[in-house]
Image (spheres, rainbow, N blue to C red):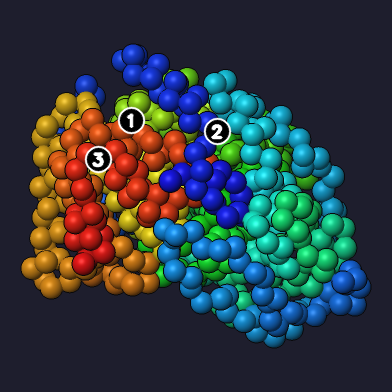
């Protein structure tokens, strides 16, 4: 059934309070409004199919002297009884290693003064029909981040964040974990937390061995339903070259004049039925997993740089030191992402009340228009199919990635090499990335552990888009050249395997073929057996039950079972679990 809507929580399976309203809005939109064929099919298919599946494709309070100590073992917390349909427990988080911490300099930023119980600012980032959603998720992590970009031969970030965290588990928590994504090899950077306060008191900082997460102990514990206020001073460095074939693939760093800030801040880890989820992720595929949250961000950067980011920009201030501070808000969203450059221009359009901004480099206006047309058309289709997109803005940006594209909350990142005379694979990229605004952002999932749950759905959504706009040539190209051809290649090469499983259980020889091709074929097989009416009802039900929450494989499979008048377990066993 449906998961619960909130932050670091049990994600208990109960129907969302939003269901009835979303069904009503979706029904109204069905009463409203062929995509122009703005580029040659052969060009799109030839380029897109070759590229699409290469990415996306990421007791007492401590004293000042105790600040430098490192906790070397996390205190175990009892975990609520496992739901009957969830995955079996995994091993507990790795024991932190003892590493010395340097003597800390005074923080660059003072402790921020902000009322983290006030959510009114987010009404400005949501469509009017969804403005109340800002007040209906009070347990979601609420971030206030102040960060400064410091350019140079080795660009870096320095900042501070406060996070209001509510324990929505059925058990007390003795510690918190924050992911430091830049430390993952795929990201190629570094990140650290230099100082921590818990409810105004200094706290020790521990790290798991690979450095991808920091542990903050809770001296008094955090009872079920209780709230704590955590302040973290952090810094990060940015790589200056693209590591091809990795999960980062140029999506974090400074390359070709573009700053890509994916996962730059300490991100509260997910606590679910397995405990703290600290999977490091593979060198390919997606590494990110987070609860829905609210973000207010003050980003200071040199004047002349423009910012595209999750959510909406609320204000800009020019400073006397030659910098500009951008004040932004986003929520409820899965993460906060920002990119900065002085090399882009933008065009804008509108669909269903959403402003779509398509950014482009010099010479890329025609490509930006193609991206715009496909984005608005896809958004219109998926609003009817999966329930309305609730935010006021959606941005499309060209990134110096070696992959095909990447999804962020409110932002679609595309390969910059699409924006040239040779064109690119917009015909597949745009519907795929737009679909991720549902299957990643609005409906979260454990991407490192269950990558098919968002990627297979997003890729099948490309087929559904071309079906909806009555473009049979592109529809056939997706089914025959992307899904069946690539899956048959895996079978002929002897690298076929079940769709289910973590990214780490695949290798680069079969990940694309299975997750992006076999997974959609499973969905199509289920659709053919259920019939269109039941299948689309199941997809809409799944999307609404899990909106703003985290879904697991059984949530989707149970939605399909619920709406099917004929058994489908044999298809699930064959395609998903290989039984």
With respect to residue 204, does 573 lie above or below?
above
Question: Mark 1 highlights which residue?
Answer: 385
Q: For marks 2 and 1, give the one nearer the viewer.
A: 2
Judging from the image, what secondary structure is the residue with disc 2 in? Answer: loop
Local packing at callout 1 (Cα closer than 10 Å; few below 14, some 14-19, many 20+) is many
Left or right: 194 in relation to 248: right
Give the structural element (helix, strand or loop) at label 3. loop
102 displayed left or right of 477: right
- Measuring from the top left, give residue 131's x and y in whole percent: 61, 25
Q: Residues within 10 Å of mark 3 (few under 14, many from 20)?
A: many
Q: Can you identify the residue that label 2 sits on?
A: 17
- Which mark, by number, is residue 564? 3
User: For residue 246, what is the image quadrant?
Assistant: bottom left
Q: Residue at x 29, y 51 (%)?
A: 456
Instruction: Say if residue 284 shows up in the picture.
Output: no
Between marks 2 and 3 in the image, the one whose residue lies nearer the viewer: 3
Image coords of residue 215 (percent x, y) = 69, 70
């Amino acid at each position: 059934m449906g998961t619960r809507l909130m932050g670091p929580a049990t994600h208990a399976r109960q129907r969302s309070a939003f269901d009835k309203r979303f069904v009503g809005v979706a029904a109204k939109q069905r009463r409203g409004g062929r995509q122009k064929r703005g580029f040659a099919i052969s060009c799109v298919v030839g380029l897109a199919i070759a590229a699409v599946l290469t990415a996306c494709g990421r007791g007492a309070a401590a004293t000042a002297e105790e600040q430098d100590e490192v906790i070397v073992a996390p205190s175990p917390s009892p975990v609520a009884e496992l739901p009957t349909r969830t995955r079996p427990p995994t091993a507990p988080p790795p024991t932190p290693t003892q590493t010395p911490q340097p003597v800390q300099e005074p923080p660059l930023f003072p402790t921020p003064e902000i009322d983290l119980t006030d959510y009114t600012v987010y009404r400005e980032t949501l469509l009017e029909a969804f403005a109340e959603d800002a007040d209906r998720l009070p347990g979601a992590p609420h971030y206030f981040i102040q960060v400064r970009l410091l350019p140079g031969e080795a660009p870096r970030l320095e900042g501070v964040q406060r996070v209001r965290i509510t324990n929505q588990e059925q058990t007390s928590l003795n510690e918190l974990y924050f992911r430091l994504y830049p430390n993952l090899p795929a990201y190629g950077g570094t990140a650290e937390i230099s100082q921590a306060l818990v409810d105004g008191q200094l706290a020790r900082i521990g790290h798991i061995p690979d450095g991808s997460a920091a542990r903050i102990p809770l001296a008094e514990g955090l009872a079920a339903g209780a709230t704590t206020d955590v302040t973290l001073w952090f810094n990060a460095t940015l790589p200056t070259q693209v590591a091809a074939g990795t999960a980062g693939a140029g999506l974090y760093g400074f390359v070709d004049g573009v700053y890509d800030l994916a996962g730059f801040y300490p991100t509260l880890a997910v606590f679910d039925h397995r405990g703290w989820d600290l999977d490091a992720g593979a060198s390919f595929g997606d590494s990110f997993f987070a609860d829905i949250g609210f973000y207010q961000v003050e980003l200071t950067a040199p004047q002349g740089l423009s910012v595209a980011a999750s959510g909406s920009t609320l204000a800009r201030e020019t400073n006397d030191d030659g910098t500009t501070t951008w004040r932004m808000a986003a929520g409820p969203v899965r993460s906060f992402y920002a990119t900065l450059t002085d090399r882009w221009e933008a065009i804008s359009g509108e669909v269903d009340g959403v402003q779509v901004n398509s950014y482009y480099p010099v010479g890329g206006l025609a490509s930006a228009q193609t991206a715009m047309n496909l984005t608005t058309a896809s958004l219109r289709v998926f609003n009817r199919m999966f329930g309305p997109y609730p935010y006021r803005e959606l941005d499309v940006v060209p990134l110096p990635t070696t992959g095909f594209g990447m999804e962020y909350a409110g932002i679609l990142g595309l390969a910059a090499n699409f924006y040239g005379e040779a064109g690119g694979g917009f015909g597949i990229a745009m519907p795929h990335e737009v679909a991720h605004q549902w299957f990643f952002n609005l409906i979260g999932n454990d991407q490192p552990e269950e990558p098919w749950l968002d990627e297979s759905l997003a890729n099948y959504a490309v087929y559904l888009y071309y079906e909806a706009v009555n473009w049979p040539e592109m529809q056939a190209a997706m089914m025959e050249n992307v899904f069946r051809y690539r899956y048959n290649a895996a079978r002929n090469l002897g690298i076929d395997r079940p769709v289910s499983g973590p990214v780490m259980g695949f290798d680069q020889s079969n990940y694309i073929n299975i997750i992006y091709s076999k997974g959609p074929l499973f969905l199509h097989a289920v659709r053919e057996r259920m019939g269109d009416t039941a299948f689309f009802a199941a997809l809409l039900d799944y999307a609404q039950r899990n909106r703003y929450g985290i879904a697991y494989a059984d949530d989707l499979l149970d939605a399909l079972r619920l709406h099917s008048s004929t058994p489908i377990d044999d298809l699930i066993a064959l395609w998903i679990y290989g039984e």
